[in-house]
Each structure stands twice: as C-alpha cells, then as structure tokens.
Image (cartoon, grey):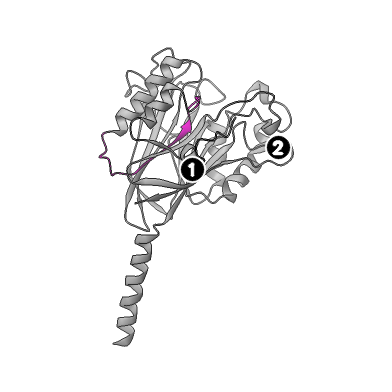
Amino acid sequence: MKKILLLILTLITFGATEAKNPPVHRVMSANIRITGLEADNVANRHWDDRKEYMVDVIRSYKPDVVMMQEVIYDSYNYCKKELKGYFAFGFEGPEMDPYTEGYHFIGKNVIFFSKKRYELIASGCYWLSEEPTIAGSISWQTNRARHANWVRVLDRKTGKQMRFIDVHLDHKSPLAKVNQAKLIVQEAAQYQQPFPQILCGDFNSGKTEEQVLHFTENGWTDWYDVLHNGVEFGRTAHGFMGENHPRKGRRIDYILTKGGAKALSCEVITDHRGELYPSDHYFMLAEIVVE
C-alpha cells in the first residue's frame, strides 16, 4: 500500500513539475545555400567542402526541429542520410520545374523533425502566389516560385499538438514580399488563437520592413527582437565571410511564434572553423515552450 501511495505521489509531483516547467522544443532555422552555383566553386564554399561540417553544426545543437531553406536534390539526399532519427517533409511532391539535377530555380523548404519526439498528424504545401494550389505559380513580379511547407505534429511527451511552417520570401520584388507575408498570415489565421504555430525562414527583409511588420502586427512574435530588447544582430546573410563581411547589414532570418508558443531563448549561431562556414547564412536556434 505504501509503495502504491509513493508511486501516486511521484506521478502527481512529476505532473506538477511538467505543468510548471513544460518541455522545451529546440527549433532551428537554417538556410543551407543552394548547391552547384558557379560562384561557390572555390575552397570552403563548395558543397562538398562544407556539407560535413554543416551537418556537424546542426547535430551539435541537438535540435528537435530543423527548418531548412534552399534545399535541392544533392543537399536533400545528403541531409536525409546524415540526419538520422529525423523525418524529412517538404521535398517530394509537385515540382517547380521538370529538372531533376542542378539548379533551375528550384530550392525547397524542408522540415526535419525528430521521429522520437513527434508524431506526424498532417502536412501540406501551398505556393506564395495568387494561385496557392498551383505548383510553381508566380505572382507579384516574384523572381521565382516560392512556397510554404508545414507539418502539424503531436508532441509525444505532452500529448499537445503544434504546427511548424517553413518559408522563404522573394529576394528581389518588394511587392512580392509583402503579398507573400500577407498570404502566410492569412493561411495561418484559420487556426484558432491558442493553437501553437512556429514559423521559420529567410524573409530577405529587415525587421522594420512592411512584410515583417505584417507578421508582428497580426499576432506573430519575433523572439530574437523581443528577447534582445530590440538590439539588432546585424547581417545573418554574410556571404561566407562572417564578421569579415565589408558591409553592415540586417538580420533577414527569423523564428516567429503565434498562439500558445513562446521562446525562452533565441540566438544566432555563428559557428565556423577558420574560414569554413556551414552556409552563407548564420543559422538561428530558439528554445520554445508550448503553454
């Protein structure tokens, strides 16, 4: 009888601790750089030179979820092989073009999430255009087709569901960036406010630009900005130069949340090995709890 009572008390205490200190979700945003570009056919920038180190950096932070941008065939196959224990969503499916090799304006946003931590409930893709159900559709003078991939998962630790969204806004057309942001905000709004949503991506925009403000003015929180009291990091797209980049810049990579998700920390990952960087972007990492 005493053993049973002790077990009950232990379970109650564990449950109270879990409620007070909910489990952390380590979420990484990583623009891994399109492979095969002629400009990268030099030491330390070529995919074969940096791919092993890139995966080592990702692994070292033990993320539960990694939301990548600019993933194409060779980088997808490599990451899928090396990131064991993760389920990869967002590469297979409707293509932007008919090619299966090289870079032909295709670069997908792939979500890797821990199979041990999460159960997949639902997933989807929509295109950032006036025809979001048409694969490869282009609107608003966007330079290339852009899309959003998302997964809805069940956290096996808590039994709670949440949604992860991975995006990459256009890099040239201001009109496209604004309308792409509006479409993402509108699509996410179909979920009731308490439902936790985590959005990662390369916005190709600074925090004061209209497209980013559209997120923060419509219920999304930019956790780097909040947790660092508005002090800007600077350039996250550093062109493989890190702190040696000759031009000052802005952070264009983001981790945002909406609903019952909040970040305890949000940092820019600046790891490098001499002149070898994982990518031409710094990655970002947030520790997120679901209330």
Image quadrant containing the N terminus? bottom left
Name the residue nearer the viewer: 259 or 59.
259
Q: At 40% across and 59% down in the image, what residue appears?
A: 21
Q: Position of residue 276 (x, y in %)?
A: 70, 37
166 sits to left or right of 43:
left
34 sits to left or right of 210:
right
120 sits to left or right of 40:
left
Q: Which residue is mark 1?
A: 227
Query: Does the magenta portion include 71?
Result: no
Q: Position of residue 106 (x, y in %)?
A: 49, 24
Q: Position of residue 221 (x, y in %)?
A: 40, 37
Please name which of the two marks, 1 or 2, marks the residue nearer to the observer: 1
Name the residue nearer the viewer: 72 or 127.
127
Question: Marks 1 and 2, Cα distance to the nearest angstrom?
Answer: 29 Å
Occupied quadrant, residue 91:
top left
Magenta stretch bounds = 190-206
Q: Please, which residue is most extreme toward the top here? A: 141
Q: Which residue is mark 2?
A: 276
